[in-house]
Image (spheres, rainbow, N blue to C red):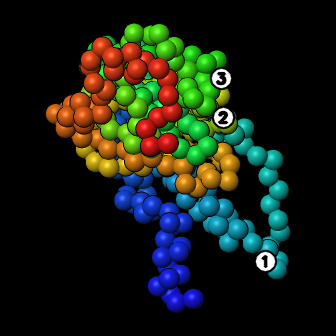
Amino acid sequence: MPSSLLLSTLSPLQAEIRQTSVWWLPRNVNMFGHEIDFIFYVILWITGITAVAVFSVMIYFIVKYRARPGVPAIHSHGNSALEVIWTTIPVFIFLALAIYGNEQWTQMRLRTPPADALPVAVVGEQFGWNVRYPGPDGKLAKMTASKVSKDNPFGIDPQDPDGRDDFTTYGELVFPVGRPVRLYLSSKDVIHAFYVPEFRLYQDMVPGRVYDFVWFKAEATGHFQLACNQLCGQGHYKMFGKLSVVPEPEYEAWAKGKAPATTAGSEANSSTPVAVAGR
């Protein structure tokens, strides 16, 4: 088989090229990412300095007190004061990290999202992402996990008036920069995970539940990749979505182009849950 033909055959199987560094943390674009990066570097420096200090002392003692002819061994029963010190210091360090980490978790997961947050529903399935956006009314149809099915991936009530102007995409997410976004996450079949490294955002999605407490605010524009971070089946490797953060006017124009017509007839039709676009 010619090499050109072989490459053309294998090209669809190649993974998408990552646009950010693979050797270190990707750039952060989420308002919550600064605190996450801060605690990461604090832990890195503490553990790094501790490792260097411990191994330096260990190597020093190995050399200084090595076995030598005519030099008797020294027997030590330890030092209670030193043991108390090197036990107490790590305790306070771990407590400080735990308190700080819990506070950041509270801000990210337990604080009520701002009232102007854009609601977006994301439902994972083998092997893709169903996405639902609100129309001009700014409201999403209510999701009910028990109603999720093949033809109704979002588990919405067809009679819910809030869903008449909603629109859907498949594997495509667009968010406005500088505006809070509240996610409604769920899964249609197995455990998936919503993961965007540049957002410092990770959330498992278990079938039968709707996670409505995840929110963020992007501080910079760009193109990123939404990946499933749970091994969800043979097609797990290809379960990624294209995510873009754009200026607010660009998002509004995109949403307007995706939204269904606002005639009475189209509103009635758009309220019926159907498979998302692109399926």
Residue 20 vertical placement versus 230 (above, below): below
**Label 2 to label 1: alpha-carbon separation:** 67 Å
Residue 68 shows which numbered tag?
A: 1
Question: Which residue is identified by label 2?
Answer: 189
Which dot, 1 or 3, sits closer to the camera?
Answer: 3
How dense is the environment of label 3, judged by Cα within 10 Å: few (below 14), some, or many (20 and up)? some
What x and y, as percent, mark residue 264?
A: 30, 14
- Residue sticking out furthest to the bottom: 2
Residue at left 39%, top 52%? 26
Q: Mark 2 or 1 closer to N-term?
A: 1
How dense is the environment of label 1, judged by Cα within 10 Å: few (below 14), some, or many (20 and up)? few
Circle 3 — which element?
loop
Residue 208 shows which numbered tag?
A: 3
Residue 153 vertical placement versus 230 (above, below): above
What x and y, as percent, mark residue 209?
A: 61, 22
Residue at left 32%, top 31%? 217
How dense is the environment of label 2, judged by Cα within 10 Å: few (below 14), some, or many (20 and up)? many
Front-most of 139 and 245? 139
Residue at left 72%, top 38%? 80
Residue 92 vs residue 172: left or right? right
Front-most of 203 and 143? 143
**Residue 38 in sight here:** no
Kind of residue at disc 1: Arg
What x and y, as percent, mark residue 211?
A: 54, 23
Kind of residue at disc 2: Asp
Circle 1 — which element?
loop
**Label 1 to label 3: alpha-carbon separation:** 69 Å
Q: Mark 2 or 3 closer to N-term?
A: 2
Residue 40 vs residue 87: left or right? left
Residue at left 53%, top 73%? 10
